[in-house]
Image (cartoon, coloured by chain):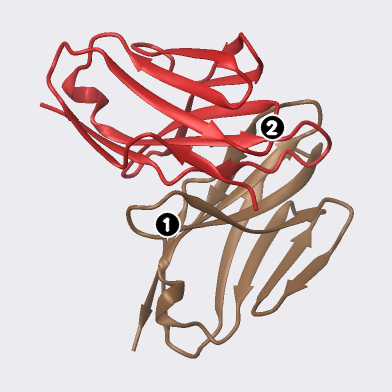
Chain colours: A brown, B red
Amino acid sequence: GEDVEQSLFLSVREGDSSVINCTYTDSSSTYLYWYKQEPGAGLQLLTYIFSNMDMKQDQRLTVLLNKKDKHLSLRIADTQTGDSAIYFCAESISGDYKLSFGAGTTVTVRA
Amino acid sequence: DVKVTQSSRYLVKRTGEKVFLECVQDMDHENMFWYRQDPGLGLRLIYFSYDVKMKEKGDIPEGYSVSREKKERFSLILESASTNQTSMYLCASSPSGKARTQYFGPGTRLTVL
């Protein structure tokens, strides 16, 4: 999606933290999402955050939202080989049925 | 748990064939979507439906049509398949309401020879 941008690749060592970044442009975004796609599979919802929140934590996942800079990040603590996947950031716009997706960040976990 | 199923995981068709891809969801969601995913291009919306018999074009509707006769089922139709329609096709559904969270099926890898 042209309104949501992500870096394309991230390489991380097993056991380290991963941080995946995303920027969006629409200030009327209501919800922001992170999806995970493993090879050959559909997209799996990981977590989402409402636009009036700054942070959300769910086990190894931490989402940070900076509304002023329109910046969203996903931190994965203690990254494992099973975390190797493509991660998509998405935003929903108030009044619109659709989500706007970023191009996806391919995360590779090396031993 | 929300479940979205797609009729086939892998499909091989010949150029000119009519192709049906089916998607079923079991959560009584109002909205359903068809995307295609190609390397380097991310997810592109083909069509979506916000109610039975209602449909709207997405970003790349050319060469495709859709049908939604029942709330739980959304079909994507390739009237005359072409090689440039070789792709991964993903179906999703979402409820109405503030959180438009989309839930995805496992995808159909379509190859057109």
Q: Amino acid at mark 2?
A: His
Q: CA distance from mark 2 to mark 1?
A: 32 Å
**Residue A25 visible in the current orientation:** no
Q: Secondary structure at mark 2?
A: loop
On screen, residue A11 versus residue B57, left or right, reads left
Label 2 Cα neighbours within 10 Å, binned few <14 / some 14-19 / many ≥20: some
On screen, residue A91 versus residue B80, left or right, reads right
Specify whether disc 2 shares its chain with disc 1. no
Q: Position of residue B30 (x, y in %)?
A: 70, 26
Q: Amino acid at mark 1?
A: Leu
B56 or B4: which is nearer to us?
B4
Q: Position of residue A76 (x, y in %)?
A: 59, 76
The residue depicted at 73 percent of the width and 38 percent of the height is B100
Query: In the rendered view of the protein, which quadrant contains the C terminus of chain B?
Result: top left
The part of the image, by quadrant, that contains residue B40 is top left
- When the figure is inspected, residue A93 is found, relative to residue A75, above or below; the finding is above
Circle 1 chain: A
The residue depicted at 62 percent of the width and 46 percent of the height is A90
- When the figure is inspected, residue A53 is found, relative to residue B55, above or below; the finding is below
Q: Position of residue B86 (x, y in %)?
A: 23, 30
- When the figure is inspected, residue B41 is found, relative to residue A67, above or below; the finding is above
> Label for residue B29?
2
Residue assigned mark 1: A8
How many numbered marks appear? Answer: 2
Label 1 Cα neighbours within 10 Å, binned few <14 / some 14-19 / many ≥20: some
A74 or B36: which is nearer to us?
B36
The residue depicted at 45 percent of the width and 20 percent of the height is B75
The residue depicted at 62 percent of the width and 38 percent of the height is B26
Verify CB contact (< 8 Å) between mark 2 and mark 1.
no
**Residue B95 visible in the current orientation:** yes
Q: Secondary structure at mark 1?
A: loop
